Amino acid sequence: MALRLPRVLVPIDLAEALRMLAQHPDACAVAGGTLALNPTQPMRPATLIDLGAIGHDGIEWSVAGELSLGGLVRIGDLAHAPELRQPAWGALIEAVDAMEPRVVRAVATLGGNLCSGGTFVGPLALLGARVEVQSRAGARWAEADAVALQPGELITRVVVPAPVRFARTHAAVLRRTPVGPALVGVALGERGGHCDIVVTGGNVRALRIGGARAGADLARSVAAAVLAAAPDGGLSGDGPWRSAVAGVLARRLAGMAQPRADAPARPDGRRHGPMWRPAAVDGPFWFRADVDDASLAVEVPAHATLTEALRAAGATQVKSGCGEGACGACAVLVDGCLVRSCLTLASRCGGSRIRTAAAPEHAGLATAIAAAGGLQCGYCTPGIVVALGSLACTAPRPLDAAAVAAELDGNLCRCTGYQQLVAAAAEALGREVPK
């Protein structure tokens, strides 16, 4: 039997992508790659279809206020649409905030989130969104909480009506891992003195409860809704555990639903996801890039992640941590964009300018972190240095403690606290950080 070599196919438009999916029914379509490239999965598919070049990543508004989102729009880009600052769209922005770490939501796509039963299922179901799914046989429409892709199908568009039913909407979610499916999520819409509640768990249809009273009884209504959805959803565990989770979400949403005049908190305005430069690769290929001002070249398999390629080329300062985009140890800058190298195909980064913690401009950061007592085992330090280096290049001035903390939200340290890191950033970047 001939050995099937791994390969990466790159369609140039939607029609070619659908043709490739039909021709390769066992292939895996990759957009953000936050799930498909997870090396903890038991097996990687023989064929990846990289959708980075086909478009369908726009955000459009109709005259009537209807929102149309491309299936490949990146989660982080939703935060940049000024129209979403209205309180009625608050659930979508709060769902963006729930996509942690920030650098992951810069690559994760809306279609991939819906496919995996992610953060946006509940808010979109609450708002009455319709999802367009296409295959070579044509297009079909599904509700946001009933998207079950068949072989050969892709999510191409999500259409959300103007949220005229609600004065405000909110969303909260609990998940096992930052990039995995939602364990359980709740979306809430306020209208007058009452609220509509949508609970999602796993990949089941959402449970909808209408007319819950706002105010003191709201937390009780949310908790009851979560527990009602738990037996059929992703909320596993014994009765006390389910009750505890229900209570956490209930208190969180009840607090959000208190009257307030300000718009929902928003992520910063920087766009720092990777630039899409996919390349078709059939079997092992030579990965070449400028890494910290040195030209590196190494032969790697078609499925190789950027972490694997860099370490194979000798750049062992790039650490291989969790492997699923949660810890930040593998962070690098690709053409100035902060990425999780464990979630990025090496074939997307050929010819790029890559900066790691060993780049000359980052030398002062590592020294300052050590001097401030922010260094113990040191495994997480390279990713932290790269994240702070990205902040130094792109953050608006003046720098404050919140900006530093937000930049480090995806960098996990199991040894030290984070106050030392904030102090180190202030010293190394030469600006005062208020306490």
Image: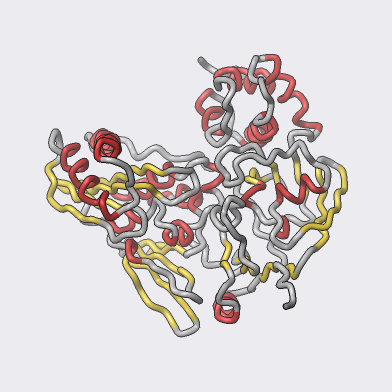
Nearer to the camera, 378 or 404: 378
Residue at (23, 49) in percent of width and height: 189
Residue 260: tell me if it is visible.
no
Left or right: 5, with 150 as reference point: right
Left or right: 302, with 60 as reference point: right
Residue 293 appears at what percent x and percent y?
Answer: 85, 42
Residue 199 appears at what percent x and percent y?
Answer: 27, 51
Left or right: 206, with 51 as reference point: left
Residue 123 vertical position relative to residue 141 in the rendered view, above or below: above
Residue 375, located in which quarter of the rendered image? Answer: top right
Residue 219: tell me if it is visible.
yes
Residue at (36, 54) in percent of width and height: 202
Residue at (79, 35) in percent of width and height: 359
Most distant residue in the front direction: 1
Residue 59 appears at what percent x and percent y?
Answer: 46, 60
Residue 97 vertical position relative to residue 126 in the rendered view, above or below: above
Residue 434 vertical position relative to residue 14 in the rendered view, above or below: above
Nearer to the camera, 83 or 112: 112
Nearer to the camera, 66 or 301: 301
